[in-house]
Image: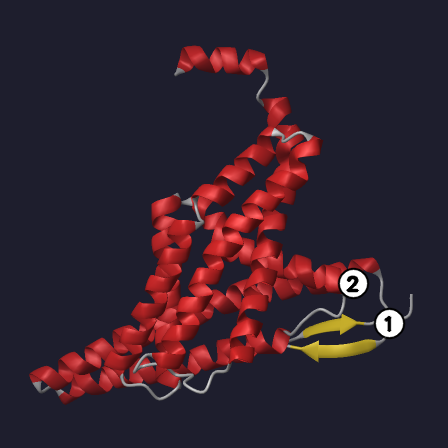
Amino acid sequence: SSQVDVRQKGGIVYRAKTSNADELAAAAKAIGGKVSGQFESAASGAWQMVGDLISATGDLVGSQDVERFGTRLSAGNAQQQKQAQARLAAIGDNPNAALNFVESGVSGAITNIVPFFVVGPTAAMTATVGQVVADEYGAGKAAGLSGPAALARSTALGSAELVGELASLPKPMMKAFKEFVKGVPAEEIMPALARYLLKENAAEQVTTALNFGTDKWAPFGIKPDSTLEDYLNAVKDTFYQTTAQTLVMGAAGRVIAPAVRAYNTPERQFANAFQA
């Protein structure tokens, strides 16, 4: 098939006309880039916090060597976070709307939802909120805030994330995934998805509103000139991301449901009852 380059960003080439295999490969690479970039950005933000703490400690005890070490550590990771954010921005959107939706859903599920099934709700929620705090701390410093102001802002945004997580995850999404794995009857799939989409989106929109309000009106906000249009765009983006994640997890549950049912036979359940 003919191949016409329409965008090359962050090492990923999206094509207007290409083979299905090439399109899927580009989408997979974009998903990997988004996930790794988000974690790299958060890690760099966390190390900036450590560096600023060391620097403040050195200043407090009168040690220039300690203060300088902390300053270098913070500055180096600020640069790394800036580069990670640039790579994330460079990935851009897949011109194939369906694949772009899948990319958003899969990368979001890996980053935000899968950890709940891997390490459990408490550890995953702590990690999610910690990632937001670390990432936003670096963003605040990059916007010119002092260390204490950046920490206040990142703590506020982390608290907003926690509110959203407590209102949605892990209960609605984990319950939805388990129900799909067990096998929701075909006629109940759309009503079930609608229920979980409503719960997830309502909770995430609360976080979006709190984030917008913090950056616009708080003394340590970095977007005081934000407009109603900016807020509506944030609402739209949140709805898109949340819907993609929810549908991806629902689809994953439906895909693995036959295997789970085949494995969890009545005979196996009977045997497990005596092993418990």
Residue of label 1: 3
Q: Residue furthest right?
A: 1
Q: Residue at x 37, y 57 (%)?
A: 163
| Mark 1: secondary structure | loop
Q: Residue at x 28, y 75 (%)?
A: 151
Q: Position of residue 107 (x, y in %)?
A: 57, 59
Left or right: where does residue 190 sit relative to residue 148?
A: right
**Amino acid type shown at disc 2:** Asp
Q: Residue at x 67, y 29 (%)?
A: 185
Image quarter in which the N terminus is found: bottom right
Q: CA distance from mark 2 to mark 1?
A: 10 Å
Depth check: give the residue in front, 70 or 140.
140
Q: Position of residue 212 (x, y in %)?
A: 43, 73
The answer to whether residue 135 is seen in the rendering is: yes
What is the crowding at mark 2: few (fewer than 14 residues within 10 Å), some, or many (at least 20)? some
Q: Which mark is residue 276?
A: none
Q: Does residue 213 sit above or below 101 in this rendering?
A: below
Quarter-of-image position of residue 101? bottom right
Q: Position of residue 210 (x, y in %)?
A: 40, 68
Q: Position of residue 261 (x, y in %)?
A: 62, 24
Whether label 2 touches label 1, CB < 8 Å? yes
Residue of label 2: 22
Q: Residue furthest front?
A: 228
Left or right: where does residue 70 sit relative to residue 163?
A: left
Q: Does residue 204 sit above or below 150 in this rendering?
A: above
